[in-house]
Image: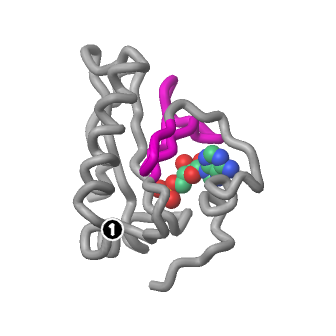
Amino acid sequence: MAYDDDNVFAKILRGEIPCDKVYEDDHVLAFNDISPQAPTHVLVLPKGKYVSMNDFTQGAPDAEIAALIRAVARIAQELGVAESGYRILANSGANAHQEVMHLHIHIFAGRKLGPMLVRRD
Ligand code: AMP
């Protein structure tokens, strides 16, 4: 899938719409989810134009990939949830219900998060 420059996270990265920023470095921006599903719900994005894990892992330089993963762990530490526990999740593609077509990693924390997926079997 081609990258759409009009997706909402592209607009946030360009500063065209605001976000509640929690972390930024050369490769990464992180902000609070607008519709949180846990007391802590942060989205961590690479600044590069990647739709999903597929093109990120195929196209991004190693430095960008390392920066994203390091940022996730650093943010969890800085938010004080690393010890109590947190969950990371990246929806990639239609079956995963990805809504915003700019790769992002969710960090959920701040309460007992329950089982990994809702069972529908
Ligand atoms: P996903 O389904 O993994 O693509 O998740 C998209 C997430 O982006 C959802 O949790 C939304 O609540 C969140 N979201 C959408 N628009 C914004 C926004 N303007 N600022 C912060 N979070 C947003």
Where residue 99 appears, as percent x and y from the top left, is 54, 64
Q: Residue furthest bottom?
A: 2
Residue drawn at x 68%, y 72% as measured from the top left: 6
In the drawing, does residue 33 fall left or right of residue 113? right
Q: Which residue is mark 1?
A: 56
Where residue 40 appears, as percent x and y from the top left, is 48, 26
In front of the other: 76 or 99: 76
Where is the N terminus found, in terms of image quarters?
bottom left
**Mark 1: which secondary structure?**
helix
> Mark 1 belongs to which amino acid?
Phe
In the displayed structure, 11 sits above or below 87; it is below
When asked about the image quadrant of residue 107, the answer is top left
In the displayed structure, 22 sits above or below 58; it is above
In the drawing, does residue 91 fall left or right of residue 43? left
When asked about the image quadrant of residue 100, the answer is bottom right
Residue drawn at x 39%, y 29% as measured from the top left: 75
| Magenta stretch encompasses residue 44 | yes
Residue drawn at x 35%, y 26% as measured from the top left: 76
Where is the C terminus found, in terms of image quarters?
bottom left
Where residue 48 appears, as percent x and y from the top left, is 46, 63
Ligand 1 within 8 Å, label 1 CB? no
Where residue 36 appears, as percent x and y from the top left, is 57, 36
| Magenta stretch encompasses residue 63 | no
Q: Residues within 10 Å of mark 1 (few under 14, many from 20)?
A: some
How many marks are shown on the rendered structure? 1
Q: Which residues are magenta?
A: 24-45
Residue drawn at x 64%, y 68% as measured from the top left: 7
In front of the other: 2 or 108: 2
In the drawing, does residue 14 fall left or right of residue 118? right
- The figure's colour scheme reads one colour
